[in-house]
């Protein structure tokens, strides 16, 4: 399962870069909010099909609804990401947008690990992590230069 997780993570990284470029163009053609709304509906449809095929049931929706509301913020963050890439991709370019997203992702990941947020285990903050984020932030800033 670890190999599958690695493969899926790499594939999602490739898809994420492509998503920024495509959604940026889509937003230019139909409007950022319109492209975002369409993507959300299409994602919901695909998710429903995957759920029914994998579980042979819609019961996963009921299980999700019974969870604490704070767990739903993951979906809201996903919506923010898609809306942002739709808006920013065409304005900052794919590289600039992805560089900033990765910088933000790693900065939040460090905070989550360091403080054990969301009930996760605490992982100490080492100098290497701090330097890595600083270098990534510098790279993101350089990627924004035209």
Image (cartoon, rainbow, N blue to C red):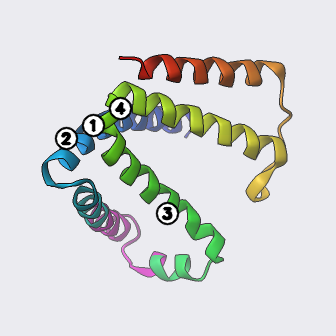
Q: Name the residue under label 2.
A: 25
Q: How far apart are marks 4 and 2 (CA)?
A: 12 Å
What x and y, as percent, mark residue 103?
57, 32
Residue 90 circle label: 1
Q: Distance between the residues labelled 1 and 3?
A: 24 Å
Magenta stretch?
43-60
Left or right: residue 56 versus residue 34 is right
Mark 3: secondary structure: helix
Left or right: residue 105 versus residue 9 is right
Depth order, front residue of 140/14: 140
Q: How far apart are marks 2 and 3 (CA)?
A: 23 Å
Q: Quadrant of the C terminus?
A: top left
Q: Is residue 30 visible to the viewer in this orientation of the structure?
A: yes
Q: Nearer the viewer, mark 4 or mark 2?
A: 4
- Of labels 4 and 2, earlier in sequence is 2
Q: How far apart are marks 1 and 2 (CA)?
A: 6 Å
Depth order, front residue of 110/5: 110
Residue sitting at x 47%, y 75%? 60
Callouts 1 and 2 close, C-beta under 8 Å: yes
Badge 2 crowding class, 10 Å Cα cut-off, few under 14, some 14 to 19, many 20 or more, is some
- Of labels 4 and 3, earlier in sequence is 3
Asked if the magenta segment contains residue 6, the reply would be no
Residue sitting at x 62%, y 76%? 69
Can you tell which quarter of the image residue 132 is in? top right
Callouts 4 and 3 close, C-beta under 8 Å: no
Q: Mark 3 points at which residue?
A: 75
Mark 4: secondary structure: helix
What x and y, as percent, mark residue 37?
28, 64
Q: Name the residue under label 4.
A: 92
Residue sitting at x 55%, y 60%? 74
Q: Nearer the viewer, mark 1 or mark 3?
A: 1
Residue 106 circle label: none
């Amino acid at each position: 399962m670890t190999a599958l997780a690695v493969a899926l993570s790499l594939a999602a990284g490739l898809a994420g870069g492509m998503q920024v470029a495509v959604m940026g163009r889509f937003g230019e053609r139909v409007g950022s909010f319109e492209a975002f709304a369409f993507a959300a509906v299409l994602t919901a449809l695909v998710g429903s099909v995957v759920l029914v095929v994998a579980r042979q049931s819609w019961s996963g929706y009921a299980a999700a609804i019974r969870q604490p509301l704070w767990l739903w913020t993951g979906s809201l963050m996903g919506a923010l990401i898609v809306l942002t890439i739709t808006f920013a991709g065409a304005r900052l370019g794919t590289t600039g947008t992805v560089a900033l997203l990765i910088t933000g992702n790693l900065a939040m990941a460090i905070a989550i690990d360091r403080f054990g947020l969301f009930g996760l285990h605490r992982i100490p903050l080492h100098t290497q992590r701090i330097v890595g984020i600083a270098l990534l932030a510098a790279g993101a800033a350089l990627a924004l230069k035209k």
